[in-house]
Image: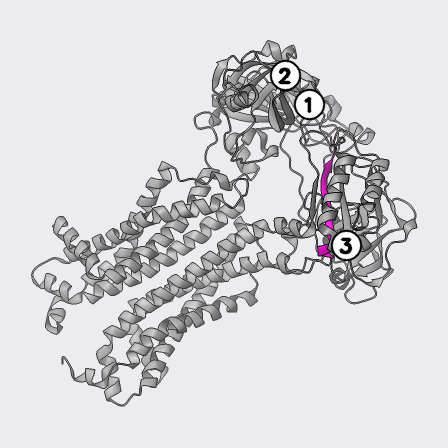
Amino acid sequence: MFRYNLELALRGLRGFPKSTVLVVLTVALGLSACMTTLALLHVLSADPLPGRSEHLYLAWVDTVLAKPFNYQSLNGVTQANYRRIKLADAQALLAAHRAVRQAVVADMAADEISADGKHAQRSQLILATSADFVPMFGVALRYGRNWTAAEDAAHAPVVLIDTELAQKLFGTVNAVGRRVRLRNTLFQVVGVIAPYAPQPHFYGLDSGVFSSDGGENLYLPYTAALDAGLSPRRADGCDASYKTASRLGLSDPTHCASLGFWVQLDTPQQVAAYRSYLTHYVEQQKALSGFGKPATSQLFSVAQWLKLQHVVPDSVRLNVGLAGAFLLLCMLNVAGLLAARFLHRSGETGIRRALGAPRRAVFQQYLLEAAAVSMLGGVLALPLTLLGLWILRRQGSDFSGLARLDPLMFGGLFAMALLVGVLVGLLPAWRASAVEPALQVKSA
Amino acid sequence: MSIRILFSTLRRHSMMPALVLLQVAVACAILCNVLFLVWQQLQPMLAPSGVAGNQLILVDQLASPQRAFTTAEVRGGEVALHEVPGVRAATAAFGLPMVGSNLMDIALQGPNGVKVGVNGYLGAGLIDVLGLQLVAGRDFLPSEYRDFGIGGTHEKWSAGGPQPIIITQTLAKRLFANGRVLGQLLTDPSDKNDLGYQVVGVVRHLLRNQLGLATNGRADDTVLLARRIASTSTLSYAVRVDPALRKAAIRGVRKVIQQHFGALLPTGITARVSSYSSRREAAFKSQRAALGLFAGITLAVVVVTAIGIMGLTGFWVQKRTRQIGIRRALGARRADILRYFLAENALIVSIGVAIGMALALLGNALLMHYYELSRLPWSWLPVGAVVMLLLGQLAVLGPALRAAAVPPVVATRSV
């Protein structure tokens, strides 16, 4: 029976070619608009490090010796707060070693010059961090080794570079043992990593949330970086004494909160223990009293952090909403067109019914026809979605370059097409199957 | 023909009109909101800037966080810029039109209690350099200027009376409600100890540099302050040039900036020198992209709705061919049949639009929740309604003409 109904449904498609084309086009338009916007939202709200991010936490203690900054702007100007900490706190938290792993994280900018001075990469984003970063964030080491905690403590001038930078500076991917100059210091390459750029760039949101052209291509111990005169570019706040004595806009981590501190905690018990450790730590900071600040410490999971920092742009969600409303419109449209063509065949339906076909069979036939039309629309929506994503990629905002259709969304497209087909087919198919056989046979 | 006939037909065959009605409602809700979004994006683009755009070259991204530029370096840059052939005036500035990198965020409160968040442009002789049109009062006197710098020399305005301020016409109307403006005082609502501001002049227009806020009559919420840029860690220049020599002047300015500041800028920072028009182009890039998207949505909604109405009405006309034939045979003219279908469509669309407007407000409430969007004003709803009514009448014209062409003889067939 199903096969026969399917055959009838397909015959129905061929019977009204003009209306079939119209319906398929409308479904394709609605589906592709929806899928294009959903694919972008899906890429932007994806887990940056699947399997790892649920164990990573950003630890923050507010030890900036200044009155809390509570400026109220009538222009909606807000100051970004990336929850960074000062050098002394970062060192204390590192030394305490209360988490499974912990890493200091700070983005800096520098020119990278090969030791012979022949090859240079100007104004590159580099990552000043500590030894645990590579195992903690799952960076793949291709050659050589990672630096050690002892080298962190010894301010050793060592770096890890990625294969692309190795190729550019030294003409070979295995650049272990070569040297690279940052400012006036020569650093020894101890290891080469695969290019690493999780999206969003959750551990360094201040230097761009999304990037289509990779992340930091050079990692070095934060201690050696500070020795070389490199400095984070911005801070979340500086000690009051420092600010008045000197200048705004500075980021020296000795006086300013400019280092991110990430920890790995594998179990809920560890998370709770670390949270109470942080609370305890900040309560001990006697110097803080007198600035009118409550002792504040926070621990954010990656998901909480991305939500707090509003990583997915509102406009992306807005577009999903608009596209969803448009798909609804397309579905109503298609439901109408399908109803028209089903009722047009009332005579045929009447004969089928008169010959003994149950109402259910007729209903199934029309529902199958609706689903078939919708699946055709889904097939056509695929190139349209790819076109839409291509247009998005050419928009040139920092995230648009990432707009891609992954297998999950590809499957989602067809699931949605089928769902749309069944939904839009329900009413017309019910209406058409309710036809009284006798009446139709008589008038036909 | 009475409207009762219309209703009774609609009631008896309710699915087709119901589907048209729902389509119209959803389309109307989308259109109201999208057209409103379009208007929000268009406003900053259409707002008059007030500056002599074709004579303006802007320099920014001069930043030195480690060591602030000295006052002598800032002045030296000004002097060197003056000597570039084609340059008429140049000044160091903080906050410039179409430059989003330096924002001056100021809160003002008028004597009537109205609070306004404005953007400030700072620099000596900006009226002359930007080519602003002074409509009342005067420019700042040379003696009134005090030093300003970010992370350098910053002279607090703590003595010698309120700061002189030049505001725009729109601000004058809002803050002083058409009363006297010159010599009046404005206060800073966030700082009770501040000496406040005294209005010395009014300019016709001056577009703010927080372009996202340049909507709903806030485009001209900009002020000038009597500040001369001194030692600072972040610096920009406004340069007014002879429009005939603009190309050569840009090259000259670029060279001067490189000579003066090239060695002072830390690695990773390069100064940006470009004409006002290219800045404008770049500043509105996101607005243009959004407009393209919204235009696409509008077009798609209009086409899909038109197809839907045409398809459904066409089928419905076909279904009622006999009925039309009978009416024609009983004496109805072609015009009557045409009018009947147009009226029927108008009735359905009107009900759809009424539901659509409610949906539009609901959608707007959602947008306001998830997206920083202002409330959809009531006056916007008729815009979507009129569009939908026109669209409905246009879409139904084809099927209605076909109906009107049905000959009376049809009534006698297949009975």
Q: Could you say whether the residue bearing mark 1 is in a helix, strand or loop?
A: loop
Name the residue nearer the viewer: B69 or A180: A180
Which chain's residue wears label 3? B
Color encoding of the figure: one colour
Q: Which residues are magenta?
A: B52-65
Compared across the picture, whether A114 is left or right of A354 comes to: right
Q: Are marks 2 and 1 on the same chain?
A: yes
Residue type of the residue flagged with mark 1: Leu
Vertical placement of residue B144 versus A153, above or below? below
Report which quarter residue B5 is drawn in.
bottom left
Residue type of the residue flagged with mark 3: Asp
Q: Could you say whether the residue bearing mark 2 is in a helix, strand or loop?
A: loop
Instruction: Using a 10 Å C-alpha cutoff, classify the residue at mark 3 as few (fewer than 14 neighbours), some (14 to 19) or many (20 or more).
Output: some
* Furthest-bottom residue in this view: B331
Location of residue A82 in the rendering, given as x and y in whole percent from the top left corner? 62, 32
Q: Can residue A106 be seen by looking at this rendering?
A: no
Location of residue B243 in the rendering, given as x and y in whole percent from the top left corner? 74, 55
Q: Are marks 3 and 2 on the same chain?
A: no
Q: Can residue A327 be seen by looking at this rendering?
A: yes
Which label is found at residue A116? Answer: 2
Residue in view at x 41 percent, y 47 percent = A387
Which label is found at residue A230? Answer: 1
Residue in view at x 68 percent, y 23 percent = A230
Q: Quadrant of the N terminus of chain B?
A: bottom left
Mark toward the viewer: 2 or 1: 2
Which chain's residue wears label 2? A
Q: CA distance from mark 3 to mark 2?
A: 48 Å
Which label is found at residue B242? Answer: 3
Report which quarter residue B157 is drawn in.
top right
Q: CA distance from mark 3 to mark 1?
A: 43 Å
Residue type of the residue flagged with mark 2: Asp
Location of residue A97 in the rendering, given as x and y in whole percent from the top left corner? 58, 15
